[in-house]
Image (spheres, helix red, strand yellow):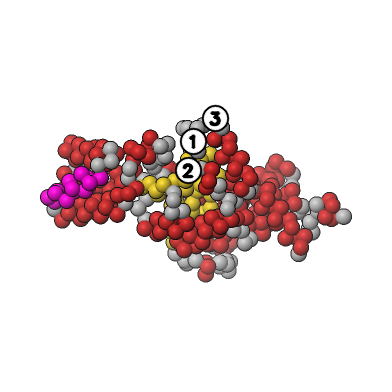
Amino acid sequence: MDDVLGLSAGRIQLAVQQAAAQLVTELPYETSSTLLGDLSGIAVSSERMHTLLNQAAEGLTVLDVAPSREEIERRVAEVSAGRFRRPVLVLGIDGAYVPTRPEHARGRRPGQARQRARRALWQGQWRDAKGFRFYLIDGDRIVHLLSWHQVQNEAQLGEALKQVKEAGIIPEDKVRLCVVSDGAEWIWKHVQALFPHARQVLDYYHWAEYLHKGAKAQYGTCLQAREWVEATLTRLYMGKVRVVLAGLKRMRPMSEEAAKAIANCLEHLHEHRGRTHYRQLRRGGYPLGSGGIESSNKFICHVRLKRSGAWWYEGNSNQMLALRCAKYNGTLEQVFARDQQQQRGA
């Protein structure tokens, strides 16, 4: 009868558990507890909400929060309707720093409630939450498909990408796959291994930042610096990579700082020269910037984890990020269904 009625052991039933989990993915635990009580009349403590969220997110992987291939193909078909060529599917890869605390910070000091606030006995650390995002280009807007962000190293991110590839979730035969990112070597290593036929694009604005630093070191903040940057970017946009490389080699640095900045520009452009055909990319409908993954970093990582005074244990931050990815992937219901099955099994 419990299975038929959808009941779970304990006082808090599944519908309330799901409502609590949805609240805490957006708001702090104390605020979520207060809102749930005010709006529904059901009292759930912030500690209990914390437990419910950890229970729902325990052991989630990228495939658990990813939409099905059928759902992704449906979104691709909607964007493809009325067009003579396949839509552009973009893969963006980047990292976002989030505040974390060490494991030994757990527990409370005795008599803390009766004492004035003290400085924490532990030191927080900003960790890199690496992630990726698949999205479609539909005119002036993007159509989100799949995001996955975790506090992890580049090998773990590569493994998650590999799982998506092997699961066949992305219909590569129905889209024009494009990878946009900055110049980090580890990103392009995984891209080349998993998606060797994808169009690779070096973020145009990332490269422009290199040029601005070189111009400032060489010419200072003057009209000549701005003119040099604009002329160089125009040549690069027109596909004259060799001309730009030759011009950088001919430059005579005014200082050691300028010499270093020019050498960085030269090395960076030479390494990524095959990813800078911006005019051709623009005509093909491909994006030139990595704004899609930067936006994902903001609405998945920053909005919830970067709150005033918030410092997260790594495990808790990854569970929160997994649920927020499920929310924006449109798969929160299947995560709750998975949690319900596990509870019944227990």
Badge 1 or badge 2: first in the primary sequence? 1
Residue receiving disc 1:
85
Measured Cα–Cα span from mark 1 to mark 2: 9 Å
Give the image location of residue 268, x and y in percent.
28, 53
- Give the class, few, some or many, for how many residues have Cα within 10 Å of label 1's Cα (few <14, many ≥20): few
Residue receiving disc 3:
82
Badge 2 or badge 3: first in the primary sequence? 3
Does residue 72 appear in the picture of this structure? yes
Q: Quick check: marks 1 and 2 in contact, CB under 8 Å?
A: yes
- Give the class, few, some or many, for how many residues have Cα within 10 Å of label 3's Cα (few <14, many ≥20): few
Q: Quick check: marks 2 and 3 in contact, CB under 8 Å?
A: no
**Kind of element beneath mark 2:** strand
> Which residue is at the far right?
1
Q: Which residues are magenta?
A: 241-254
Measured Cα–Cα span from mark 2 to mark 3: 16 Å
Q: Which quadrant of the figure has residue 174?
A: top right
- State whether residue 39 is above or below residue 335: above
- Give the class, few, some or many, for how many residues have Cα within 10 Å of label 2's Cα (few <14, many ≥20): many
Residue receiving disc 2:
176
Q: In the rendered structure, does residue 251 fall within the stretch colored magenta?
A: yes
Q: In the rendered structure, does residue 271 fall within the stretch colored magenta?
A: no
Instruction: Please give the name of the residue rendered at 63% of the width and 45% of the height, measured from the top-left corner.
Output: 70
Quadrant assignment for the N terminus: bottom right
Give the image location of residue 13, x and y in percent.
77, 52
